Image (spheres, rainbow, N blue to C red):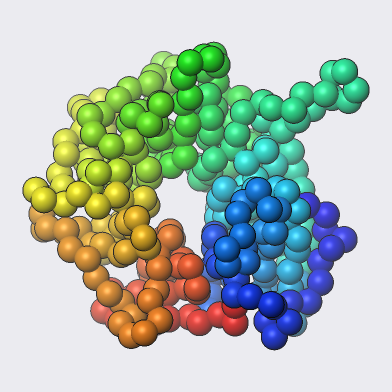
Amino acid sequence: MNPSNFRKFDASEEPEPLIQQLGCILSPDRYYAVVRPEGAEPSDGEDRLLIRDDAFGPGIMQLDLDMELPTALIRGGQLSDPVDAIMLVRAGYILMLRDGLMRVEPIPSIAPSGTGEEFSRSRGQALGATIRNGKLLVVGSEGIVVQRGNDGEWEELNRQQKREDSYFALKGVTAASGGNVVAVGHRDYRSAYLCSTEAGDWEERTLPGGYLTDIVSTGPQDYWISARKGDLWHGNPVDGFENVTPEGTTTDFLAIAAYKERFYLTAAGGDLWVFGDGRASQIFPFPGERRFLTYSFDVHDDLLWVQGQNGFGVFDGESWTRINLPW
């Protein structure tokens, strides 16, 4: 991830379509997206970050990510030292973008460290991120929870002892104002979540059914969790969670967002679902030949922003608008 590779993007020069992997959008004219050539694998090292922000130059600019594998791309305006966007890399780095500047910052608890014989190659994986009280929270493998403070210093809040016969991964994380920090994922592909306690401890717990994929909070003790096998959970770590998915829904849910008293979910294959009034149904915001495959959500400026395989969409509670991109 070398900022010196920063250069202009021209879609007409691309030999094959680019598939959007991650996205963060501030407005129709300001967005960031991680893309990969159609048919390429993560191990091919062909991922690129595309930036549409005039502060970085007119049009769309691009940066080769080499062998770095991004796992999250989020808005950073709520940080105590705000930035436009934050990209999280599995190996334990963040790329911070603001006003035409880029800064790569290692996460000390995760990123390789040392030199020569002391060099550490694997210290876990960074898989998900959120912002709480102006601080960046990062979660990952081995029950890792690390926090970047207001002074820019990193603190490891939790890490479980690595077990040779078991793999524990956290990806979705939320931090309700006045509530617990809850991170969801799986242990050996069985549902598991990690929650903070009033005593400052961290507890690992499980739920029956498919492994947990994402979480959103609508209040200090009100959490909604999406999961594989069509499971949707509602509750909190103190009183417990209830499975609230209507009977017969079995599609794998991969991400969840709360917007105007409804819950929007992505499913395997990029399908978009909505849950409300006890019912879950698939919706098609942009019918037509070109299908909009949904990957993730963001809510800001009183709008629901949807990141897909081939662009962004925005919903104002009444109608959908598609933001087509040139890749």
Q: In the drawing, does residue 283 fall left or right of residue 322? A: left
Question: How many numbered marks are there?
Answer: 0
Q: Residue at x 63, y 75 (%)?
A: 16
Q: Quadrant of the C terminus?
A: bottom right
Asked if residue 115 is positioned above or below residue 270 in the image, the reply reads above
The furthest residue to the right: 116
Quarter holding residue 196: top left
State the residue in front, 129 or 188. Answer: 188
Asked if residue 63 is positioned above or below residue 249 in the image, the reply reads below
Residue 77 in view (yes/no): no
Asked if residue 290 is positioned above or below residue 174 in the image, the reply reads below
State the residue in front, 301 or 22. Answer: 22
The furthest residue to the front: 39
Q: Residue at x 38, y 31 (%)?
A: 189
Q: Residue at x 22, y 29 (%)?
A: 208
Task: Locate residue 243, reporting x and y percent.
Answer: 16, 39
Task: Locate residue 185, reporting x and y percent.
Answer: 40, 35
Q: Residue at x 30, y 64 (%)?
A: 272
Task: Locate residue 8, reporting x and y percent.
Answer: 78, 76
Residue 285 in view (yes/no): yes
